[in-house]
């Protein structure tokens, strides 16, 4: 068990996928080639086609560049501002654009490319009358007698047609390029003559400015005429509305005073009177409340406690005098009796002062009652007057409804009239100034060098197109070509393990090349033998059949080479030619074919009589024998198993050269009886679809396909990544001077 596990580990390290096991898309051993490597291999394989396409495109690019007419481009730069210079602080007719409005500039670019501007330039430069102008651009006016060498007079319609054609030519060769993040625009014209290019470009810029000024003047003139008519209509409407207002005010006796402020409207006399009386009523009510409060305070707190009594100077003086006398009287009482004459005099003086204070307080209280009655009377009178004015004002408002309607009509007409009159004056001033928002920054100069053709760019484009064409052809040919090109196609396209790739033998026959142990073919089959060591858990399979899709792919040579390689490894090997329809082993080895496999399958038991020893370190050979009438019938019977079993008793390995798979039943029959099958694929000679069909037939027969051999492999025709020697021939004697 340990040895088996070790062998499996060695196999896994030796090859990503075991020989004899088809590679599935999701198998752990399936190798995926990077997409870049795949394309590089395709390009390397079809490198001559790609190089030829690039070369042809380059030559065409050179020829086209040399034959192309030299063109000269002149460029002028203009500035387009959103507004003209403010000579007067008055708005024009056209709408102003804000900073975020791109429609203004898009409109200007469209005007620069307009047909009317082109026709104006053509008329100014008289291009419609210049036949050389049309000739240099390859234009021909059919039926135009003036350009046919005759000097006949032409009609206005013909001249207009020439101007339109000249304008079309100008627009076809004009380019308007706004400079990003600026108000600058480049105007470029291209023609075969450098002076003409500069002349047309400068004329284009100048006429664009002139057209812009004309458009502004025309807009101003139209606006003034329109406003004159509207002003006359509004003036008449204003007069009529004012007359209606005055008539109604006279009939209803409505008298309004003008407002005092600039924005104040008219006001009525009744409203002014009511406002004034209402303010006086508010003051009278406040005074009445104040007087009533003083009277109530007198009644509640006594006469002497009211504010008027407390703040009265006369009463306060009497009270101070009484306090002084009372103080003197109190001092005398500390020493004398009340009957003391001086004490009696002071007591009499105190009584007189109290009487005076009482009289003054009575007078103050009487004045408070009088003030309260006066305030109450005034408040009552004002209330009566205010109520009367309220009724008058409500009556006035009812009569003023229609008056206000007339007044609003007058105000509206006056505002419209004043606004239009002001606008009319502004337009007149702005139109007289004639401001312009377009100016020339740089005029066009006569170009010294042609702008086209651009040699380097044209050649670069030609090379790029050639490369694209070549790559497209390479990819198309790769899709069309179904042949097996390089060893990787075996695993990628056929999904079977690659056992080895055998190079071409060159001028020598394969048998001669196999006789030279240092030849690349021998090296290839030694590598194949190494891969077969990992095909089973006991090494190289005991019985191996070698087959191919069709004849001529090298299956017989491969069968002989495998047998020879095993024999040189000191194994007892027998090579069996099982192709009983077109045998070839006896021709390769120069042996007779009187007896062979067909004799054993037909019933003979003398196996030693049909086995021949070719030489030392060579495999034993069993030829096919006489050609049977139906080889498939012989292979169907049990005799093939008996022959293989008998050979297995005498030899270590049995190599069977099987017939091709397609069209015959022999190969699947043989493959189902042996331990493993080696499939031979001819490089550059067999289609993938046929190989897949052959492999499917073997799989249907339950054959154990060990892998495939790619024969007649030419590394120079392979994809990118395979050297010319493919690793074989390493160590051979090289020419003198080589490293």
Image (cartoon, rainbow, N blue to C red):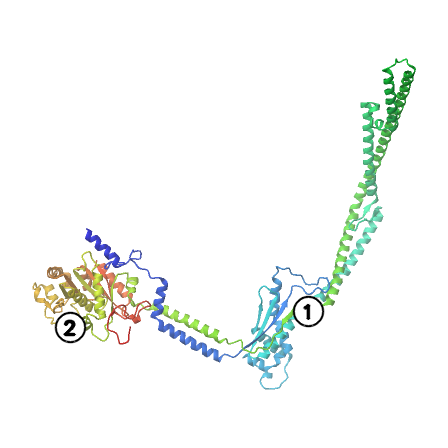
> As rendered, which of 344 and 704 lies closer to the eye?
344
Q: Quadrant of residue 502?
A: bottom left
Q: Residue 197: give its label.
A: none
Q: CA distance from mark 1 to mark 2?
A: 103 Å
Q: Position of residue 706 (x, y in %)?
A: 22, 60
Q: Which residue is mark 2?
A: 587
Task: Farthest residue to the bottom: give it.
Answer: 150
Q: Position of residue 722 (x, y in %)?
A: 30, 68
> As rendered, which of 633 and 714 lies closer to the eye?
714
Inspect this view and state whether residue 560 appears. Answer: yes
Q: Position of residue 297 (x, y in %)?
A: 81, 25
Q: Is residue 403 left or right of residue 691?
A: right
Determine the residue positioned at 39% across, 74% down: 53
1 and 2 marks in contact (CB < 8 Å): no
Q: Dot 2: few (<14), some (14–19), or many (≥20) neighbours within 10 Å?
A: few
Asked if residue 637 is positioned above or below residue 366 in the image, the reply reads below
Q: How many marks?
A: 2
Of marks 1 and 2, which one's residue comes earlier in the chain?
A: 1
Q: Secondary structure at mark 1?
A: helix
> As rendered, which of 181 and 215 lies closer to the eye?
181
Q: Residue 213: give its label.
A: 1
Asked if residue 287 is positioned above or below residue 209 in the image, the reply reads above
Quadrant in which the C terminus is drawn: bottom left
Asked if residue 732 is positioned above or below residue 255 in the image, the reply reads below
Q: Dot 1: few (<14), some (14–19), or many (≥20) neighbours within 10 Å?
A: some
Q: Secondary structure at mark 2?
A: helix
Q: Is residue 697 left or right of residue 184?
A: left
Q: Quadrant of residue 692?
A: bottom left
Q: Position of residue 42 (x, y in %)?
A: 35, 68
Task: Farthest residue to the front: give it.
Answer: 335
Determine the residue positioned at 91% across, 16% down: 344
């Amino acid at each position: 068990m340990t040895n088996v596990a070790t062998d499996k580990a060695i196999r896994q390290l030796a090859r990503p996928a075991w020989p004899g096991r088809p590679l599935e898309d999701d198998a752990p051993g399936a190798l995926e080639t990077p997409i870049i490597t795949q394309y590089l291999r395709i390009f390397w394989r079809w490198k001559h086609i790609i190089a030829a396409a690039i070369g042809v495109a380059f030559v065409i690019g050179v020829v086209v560049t040399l034959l192309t007419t030299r063109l000269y481009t002149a460029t002028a730069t203009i500035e387009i501002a959103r507004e003209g210079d403010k000579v007067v602080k008055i708005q024009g007719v056209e709408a102003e654009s804000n900073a975020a409005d791109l429609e203004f500039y898009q409109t200007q670019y469209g005007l620069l490319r307009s047909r009317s501007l082109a026709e104006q330039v053509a008329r100014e430069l008289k291009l419609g009358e210049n036949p050389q102008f049309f000739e240099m651009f390859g234009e021909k006016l059919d039926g135009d007698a003036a350009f046919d060498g005759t000097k006949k007079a032409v009609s206005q319609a013909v001249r207009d047609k020439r101007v339109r054609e000249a304008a079309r030519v100008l627009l076809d060769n004009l380019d308007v390029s706004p400079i990003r993040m600026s108000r600058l625009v480049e105007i470029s014209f291209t023609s075969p003559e450098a002076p003409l290019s500069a002349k047309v470009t400068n004329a284009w810029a100048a006429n664009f400015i002139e057209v812009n000024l004309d458009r502004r003047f025309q807009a101003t003139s139209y606006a003034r005429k329109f406003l004159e008519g509207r002003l006359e209509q509004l003036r008449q409407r204003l007069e009529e509305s004012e007359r209606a207002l005055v008539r109604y005010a006279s009939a209803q006796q409505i008298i309004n005073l003008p407002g005092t402020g600039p924005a104040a409207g008219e006001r009525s006399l009744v409203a002014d009177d009511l406002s004034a009386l209402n303010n006086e009523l508010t003051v009278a009510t406040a005074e009445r409340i104040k007087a009533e409060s003083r009277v109530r305070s007198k009644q509640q707190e006594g006469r002497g406690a009211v504010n008027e009594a407390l703040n009265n100077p006369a009463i306060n003086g009497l009270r101070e005098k009484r306090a002084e006398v009372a103080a003197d009287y109190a001092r005398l009482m500390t020493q004398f009796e009340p009957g003391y004459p001086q004490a009696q005099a002071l007591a009499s003086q105190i009584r007189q002062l109290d009487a005076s204070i009482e009289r003054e307080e009575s007078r103050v209280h009487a004045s408070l009652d009088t003030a309260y009655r006066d305030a109450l009377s005034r408040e009552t009178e004002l209330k009566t007057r205010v109520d009367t004015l309220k009724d008058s004002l409500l009556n006035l408002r009812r009569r003023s409804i229609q008056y206000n309607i007339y007044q609003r009509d007058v105000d509206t007409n006056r505002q419209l009239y004043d606004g239009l009159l002001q606008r009319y004056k502004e337009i007149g001033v702005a139109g007289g100034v004639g401001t312009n928002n377009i100016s020339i920054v740089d005029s066009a100069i006569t170009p010294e060098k042609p702008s086209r053709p651009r040699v380097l760019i044209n050649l670069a484009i030609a090379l790029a197109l050639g490369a694209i064409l070549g790559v497209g052809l390479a990819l198309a040919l790769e899709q069309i070509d179904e042949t097996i090109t390089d060893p990787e196609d075996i695993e990628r396209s056929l999904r079977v393990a690659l056992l080895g790739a055998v190079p071409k033998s060159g001028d020598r026959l394969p048998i001669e090349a196999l006789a030279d142990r240092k030849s690349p073919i021998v090296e290839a089959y030694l590598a194949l033998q190494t891969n077969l060591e990992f095909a089973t858990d006991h090494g190289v399979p005991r019985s191996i059949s070698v087959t191919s899709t069709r004849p001529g792919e090298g299956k017989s040579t491969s069968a002989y080479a495998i047998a020879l390689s095993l024999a040189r490894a000191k194994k007892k090997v027998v090579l069996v030619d099982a192709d009983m329809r077109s045998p070839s082993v006896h021709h390769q080895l120069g042996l007779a074919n009187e007896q062979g496999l067909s004799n054993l399958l037909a019933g003979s038991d003398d196996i030693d009589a049909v086995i021949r020893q070719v030489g030392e370190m060579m495999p034993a050979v069993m030829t096919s024998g006489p050609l049977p009438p139906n080889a498939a019938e012989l292979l169907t019977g049990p005799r093939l198993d008996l022959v293989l079993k008998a050979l297995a008793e005498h030899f270590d390995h049995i190599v069977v050269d099987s017939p091709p798979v397609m069209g015959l039943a022999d190969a699947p029959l043989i493959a189902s009886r042996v331990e493993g099958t080696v499939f031979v694929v001819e490089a550059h000679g067999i289609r993938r679809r046929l190989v897949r069909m052959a492999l499917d037939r073997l799989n249907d027969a339950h054959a154990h396909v060990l892998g495939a051999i790619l024969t007649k492999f030419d590394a120079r025709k392979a994809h990118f990544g395979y050297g010319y020697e493919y690793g074989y021939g390493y160590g051979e004697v090289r020419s003198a001077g080589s490293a």
